[in-house]
Amino acid sequence: MDLHKKYLASLKDKKNSFEHAVTEYLRMSGVYWGLCSMYLISSEDLLNKDEVVQWVLSCQHPSGGFGGSVDHDAHLLYTLSAVQILLIFDKIELVDKEKIANYVAGLQQDDGSFYGDEWGEVDTRFSYCALSCLSLLGLLDKIDVNKAVDFIVSCMNFDGGFGCIPGAESHGGQIFCCVAALAIADSLHHVRADDLCWWLCERQTAGGGLNGRPEKLPDVCYSWWNLSALVILGRIDWIDREKLRQFILNAQDETEGGIADRPGDVADVFHTFFGISGLSLLGYTEEDEEGIPGLRRIDPVYALPVQVLERMNVRVWRAV
Ligand SMILES: COc1ccc(S(=O)(=O)N2Cc3cc(-c4ccc(C=O)o4)ccc3N(Cc3cncn3C)C[C@H]2Cc2ccc(O)cc2)cc1
Ligand SMILES: [Zn+2]
């Protein structure tokens, strides 16, 4: 835990690294992954709250949307990340919620789908970003939720999984987005839970890690994508939790801190966040028996600390 705290706190000082330069376009999400990781290991105090909040606000456009960095175009991905950061810091009152909600609602299409931004890419990832962002702002009534649900259901495949668009293959990342979005819309009855959870538990490989599609290598981030869907559908016991826990712990960098996509690879903030979140979902938090001291609970639907959601009176997910 101490090494992970040092790793996460050091990210703000690595502004000249290659990785920092090539991930400028998603910096808003990178800050959310880093900050939420620090909160989950009870070390959010290591960040300069006012400095981060001012930077987030400097990325907002007149449209109400947020870009991935200063002077970057507004996008739904980074608008959600900005709202999540402000909620973790309890500073959402600094923004005009209606303005953000109007930006998000303006991206919904006639078939219920969402563009990621003005350039028109459609992906079920963006359906999740829209429903999660509006739900967190308490403004779900700004969109046609029934049509949003219809589009998501149109992306369901024979295997019970979901893809980016109708007819696209099932993928762990899209399955999280669609199942969590349907949960927010109180529409989980559309999910063929046994078929989908069979597909999800089949994603566990011999080494204990989960992959995102059949025949692919296991990857720590699917400890979030696949596992959160299993938790939402109440079937976490369909996988071997201890073997998955071991896979995540083996992906830790024992010298520098951080967690990689799999054992032996270089750690990054993306996989550090999803590894810590996976351990939290597996029930190894400070509230659980044999839990990791200092590890807090994460909500499987909103990917935010449960304590943050409870402070906001947003309904926290309880497995069915
Ligand atoms: C290293 O190659 C990639 C490939 C895709 C991407 S991505 O932006 O399309 N994206 C998010 C993502 C981020 C990172 C990363 C490393 C350091 C930082 C600093 O903030 O961020 C690394 C990977 C990654 N991927 C790729 C990936 C993860 N596991 C397997 N792969 C191939 C995911 C990808 C898609 C994505 C997921 C969530 C999200 O909110 C936005 C985009 C980024 C780097
Ligand atoms: Zn990954």
Image: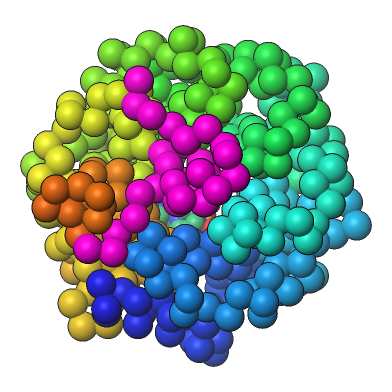
317 falls in the magenta region: yes
**Percent coordinates x, y for residue 113 in the rendering:** 69, 26
Name the foreground residue: 184 vs 68: 184
Q: Residue at x 78, y 71 (%)?
A: 58
Please give left or right for residue 144 compared with residue 61 in the image.
left
Relative to 36, residue 97 above or below: above
> Does the segment drawn in magenta span residue 60?
no
Residue at horizontal 40 percent and vertical 22 percent from the top: 161
| Dominant SS type (magenta) | loop
Q: What scheme was used to colour the molecule? A: rainbow
Q: Which residues are magenta?
A: 293-320
Q: Quadrant of residue 169?
A: top left
Q: Quarter holding the N terminus?
A: bottom left
User: 256 or 266, which is in the foreground?
Assistant: 256
Residue at 70% x, 41% y: name it. Answer: 137
* Image quadrant containing the C terminus: top left
The quadrant where residue 61 appears: bottom right
Q: Is 98 or 106 nearer to us in this picture? A: 98
Left or right: 64 as drawn, with respect to 178? right
The x and y percentages for residue 298 are: 39, 48
Residue 82 horizontal side relative to residue 156, left or right: right
Task: Please give the name of the residue rendered at 55% of the width and 86% of the height, measured from the top-left corner.
Answer: 15
Q: Report x, y in % for residue 283.
A: 23, 44
Residue 62: x and y, percent? 90, 57
